Amino acid sequence: MFVSVIGGSRCSQREAELAEEVGAELARRGVTLVCGGLTGVMSAACKGAHSAGGMTVGILPGTRREDANPHVDIPIVTTIGEARNVIVVCSGQAVIAIGGE
């Protein structure tokens, strides 16, 4: 199963903690986490998934795989900027949003 986690590239400490908890719980349940692959909520969720032995996929906005946060197992470049968010959402069988305005 794939679950997408979405949220800001900048987030509060509480949002980062929550994202990490969500990532870890998804991994414990055998879920592959999909996200935008960068910083903030995305990095925290991936970190949590890794801490619990999970797999992460980062759908990146640009052309460089090395831009992915260090917790992304499978970086996918898109070259489409923020439009990649559609791919992130559509890749999950469910979507969890953390934070945001």
Image: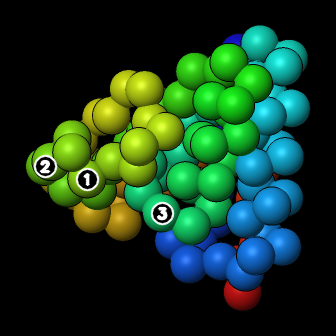
Residue position marked by numbered label 3 in the rendering:
39
In this rendering, the answer to whether 94 lies above or below 97 is above
Between circles 3 and 2, the one closer to the viewer is 3
Q: CA distance from mark 3 to mark 2?
A: 16 Å
Q: Which residue appears at 64% of the width and 54% of the height?
A: 44
Residue position marked by numbered label 2 in the rendering:
63
Which is more toward the observer, 1 or 37? 37
Q: Amino acid at mark 3?
A: Thr
71 vs 11, left or right, is left
Between circles 1 and 2, the one closer to the viewer is 1
Q: Quadrant of the N terminus?
A: top right
In this rendering, the answer to whether 50 lies above or below 22 is above
Q: Secondary structure at mark 1?
A: helix
Measuring from the top left, give residue 99's x and y in whole percent. Answer: 76, 73
Q: Which residue appears at 65% of the width and 77% of the height?
A: 11
Measuring from the top left, give residue 80's x and y in whole percent. Answer: 23, 57
Measuring from the top left, give residue 47's x and y in whole percent. Answer: 62, 43
Contact between labelled residues 2 and 3, with CB atoms less than 8 Å apart: no
Regarding residue 97, the answer to whether it shows in the image is: yes
Residue position marked by numbered label 1 in the rendering:
67
Colour scheme used in the picture? Answer: rainbow
Contact between labelled residues 2 and 1, with CB atoms less than 8 Å apart: no
Which comes before the other along the chain, label 3 or label 2? 3
Q: Amino acid at mark 2?
A: Thr
Snapshot quadrant of residue 65: top left
Q: CA distance from mark 1 to mark 2?
A: 9 Å
Q: Secondary structure at mark 3?
A: loop
Regarding residue 94, the answer to whether it shows in the image is: no
* Labels in figure, total: 3
